[in-house]
Amino acid sequence: MSSDTTNSQASKVGLIALVVGIVGIVIALFGFKQGWDGSDVRPIMSWLISLAFWLSIVVGMLFLVQIWYVFHARWPTIIRRQCEHCFAALPWLLLLFLPLLAIPFLHENPGLLWKWMDGNNAIPGQITVAEDPFFQWKEPYLNIGFFTFRALGSFLIFIGIAALLRKWSFDADKTGNINNTHYARRLSALGLFLCATGATVASIDWFKSLEYHWFSTMYGVWFFSAAIRAALSAIIILCVILAAKGYLKGILKQAHRYDVACMMLAFTVFWAYISFSQYFLIYSANIPEEVFWYNIREKNFDGTVNSWWWVSMGLIFGHFLTPFLLLLWYKTKVVVWRTVAVSAWILGFHLLDLYWNIVPGKIVDAAITEGYLVRQFSVTFYDVAALVGIGGICIFAMCRSMGKAEPIPVRDPNILTSINYTE
């Protein structure tokens, strides 16, 4: 298929994605405004969940590209170009993060989403955030100014590194200058540490600090493993679609899919290891400041099982055991529809994992003198709208980028090895 034809197809898909994305975002922003006006945090969480889902995929791809550069991996060269197109979504994701960042500056309750941002917010125990010893000790870190600096800093790291990797890769198509590859490898050696810092800070600030009492030294690694796993699943689906539509027809081989699926299996085990280790260490120590985070994801204050217990079981058996067993089977890694099905399954449960990490929380009820309510699991219309809306913008950015470069890095020193790659 000619370059003009593929660019035309990409432009058409991008336009459709843009229209769908705008519609979804308008609906989600309507829910956001309702939450803003009514001081209801749940519609605002819809925005955070969807943003986290799409950002985790793109950041996971950024990690993977740098890992491939550092280890001089030749086989994923044709896949790397597709990841580079996805990097184009990062500036848009920063723009879409701004409504959340506006809350502490413009809302009458700066702590509407992150309750620690307003010292007057009530917390269980008939005290306010400002009176809480835990917040007082964490206040040098948990303050609005430093939070804003860290959020923008994380995006700056992601966008800056991605922009340089794209620039050098695209320039190599035109000039064939091998120095572009050397520059990318050197940057990746440092960039991995910078991205790890940015991802850790972002996950702790945006998700973990929703319940700021909690302590965990493994949370950043959980996000890293979840993001890589989601990125690998998205890569499988994206590359199979591109191969079917002609963009990568005859280029994407079974060997490429097989190796990506092997990495999916490895990170399925790694995600489970990190998640279980975090749980096991907190369970063993049995410190109240740590165990409550898991308690509210199993039971209400009165000891009755809540909706999150079923989600927890879904993550154990759906997010780990099922894909683990399926990916052990060779045919799952080479039969196209099976690999795509497992990838879609993992992405679905990755979204559920984000729900599990973001939505549960202690709710103070004035009618309850002791204890608290737990925010229960629910999927709302605004969740779907935000997911589709932000996803549409990301797909639009990717398709727009596809018209600016060749489908594969045609003058990369490793391109022939990648095209002729076999198991």
Image (cartoon, helix red, strand yellow):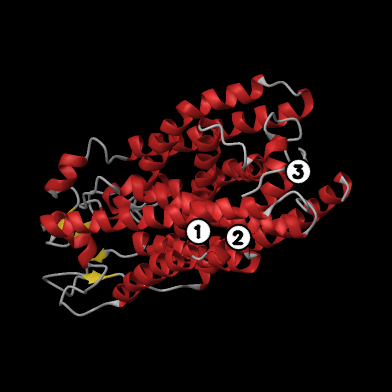
The answer to whether residue 350 is above or below residue 367 is above
Residue under label 1, please give it.
50
Earlier in the chain: of badge 2 and badge 1, it is: 1
Disc marking residue 407: 3
Residue at 38% of width from left, 62% of height from top? 41
- Determine the secondary structure under disc 3: loop
The percent coordinates of residue 279 (x first, y second) are 23, 58
Residue under label 2, please give it.
389
- Determine the secondary structure under disc 1: helix
Inter-mark Cα distance, 2 to 1: 9 Å
- Determine the secondary structure under disc 2: helix
Q: Are marks 2 and 1 in contact (CB under 8 Å)?
A: yes
The answer to whether residue 74 is above or below residue 266 is above
Left or right position of 355 against 242: left
Pointer 1 local density, CA inside 10 Å: few below 14, some 14–19, many at least 20: many
Inter-mark Cα distance, 3 to 2: 26 Å
Camera-side mark, 3 or 2:
3
- The residue closer to the viewer here, 31 or 79, is 79
- Report whether residue 43 is seen: no
